Image (cartoon, grey):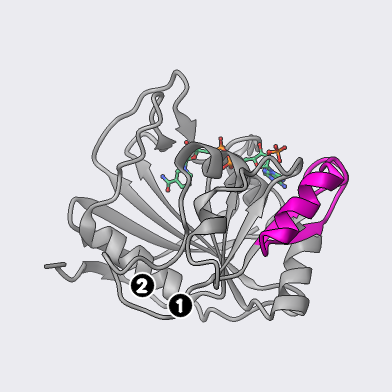
Amino acid sequence: MPMPCKTLYIAEQTAWKPKEWRPFVIVSCAISLDGKLASACGDVRLSSFDDKVEVHKLRSMVDAILVGINTILRDNPHLTVSEKYYRSDNHPIRVVLDSRCRIPLDAEVITRRPEVRTIVATTRLAPKEKIEKLKRRGVDVVVMGNSKVDLKKLLRYLRDEYNVKILMVEGGGYVLGSFFREGLVDYLRVSITPVLFGDGEAVSMIRGAVFCKIEDSPKLRLEKIEICGHNVILHFAVSS
Ligand SMILES: NC(=O)c1ccc[n+]([C@@H]2O[C@H](COP(=O)([O-])OP(=O)(O)OC[C@H]3O[C@@H](n4cnc5c(N)ncnc54)[C@H](OP(=O)(O)O)[C@@H]3O)[C@@H](O)[C@H]2O)c1
């Protein structure tokens, strides 16, 4: 039986309103106490059952959910709302950032619940034949950029063509790094797990971005603290 999360602190809440030209962007991720999304050997079992219930509830409330290709290749997630955690018929559109169309044709985001739309956002580097194969499997492929997916273009496109008003970005580290670096995050829900992963090949929450001085960091205003099972959940309003 899931236990409701316990709220320890609550401040003024931000309205989840889309921007004029793009969706409202929520980052949701789970980290070790030392800020890692995955351990050196790829262990990502960070969230408690109660935390997962909340994450799947959140998935059911957003219009689209986005991850990077490394997350697909590493974990093969299906990215729909799982009945195991939360019952809902609202499954968000799935979006994968994949500059070279490396996504396997049998990836769970393609084969599981094919009635739920999957978009592969790619670049001019993608082989035409692979794009065609993906389209034949019912995947929407959009070319947005030369070598990495142009996030601003993609967000505008998701809003204009798919009516995405709220987008949830789940990771991994390079994707979160890009969204924060480009000032495209409005809200952060971070679930902290009381474990330490150390470094080696462990995956940092923010990769490929450097905020050298404290004043360079995105501005995070604490809105809520919750306890969900063994996780401490911090919610922040974010501005650049
Ligand atoms: N704990 C959590 O909540 C959580 C959530 C998600 C993932 N993870 C973990 O995170 C790890 C993967 O993270 P990662 O940092 O290696 O990779 P990632 O962020 O999942 O994927 C990054 C890749 O996406 C592609 N990409 C295309 N356009 C991009 C853009 N504009 N910005 C950023 N990336 C773009 C690039 O590959 P191409 O150049 O080939 O396109 C890039 O290397 C996995 O171990 C996974 O288990 C953990």
Please check the rendered image and state whether residue 128 is part of the magenta-colored stretch, yes or no.
Answer: yes
Q: Quadrant of the N terminus?
A: bottom left
Q: Is residue 49 left or right of residue 145?
A: left
x, y (%) of residue 25?
Answer: 59, 66
Can residue 149 be seen at all in this image of the molecule?
no
For the view shown, which residue lies furthest in the left direction? 1
Tag 1's secondary structure? helix
Can residue 167 be seen at all in this image of the molecule?
yes
x, y (%) of residue 34?
Answer: 36, 34
Q: Is residue 78 left or right of residue 147?
A: left
Q: Which residue is mark 1?
A: 61
Q: Residues within 10 Å of mark 1 (few under 14, many from 20)?
A: some
Tag 2's secondary structure? helix
Q: Residue at x 17, y 56 (%)?
A: 229
Q: Which residue is mark 2?
A: 57
Q: Is residue 59 above or below residue 144?
A: below
Please check the rendered image and state whether residue 42 is part of the magenta-colored stretch, yes or no.
Answer: no
Circle 1: residue type: Met
Structural distance between the alpha carbons of marks 1 and 2? 7 Å
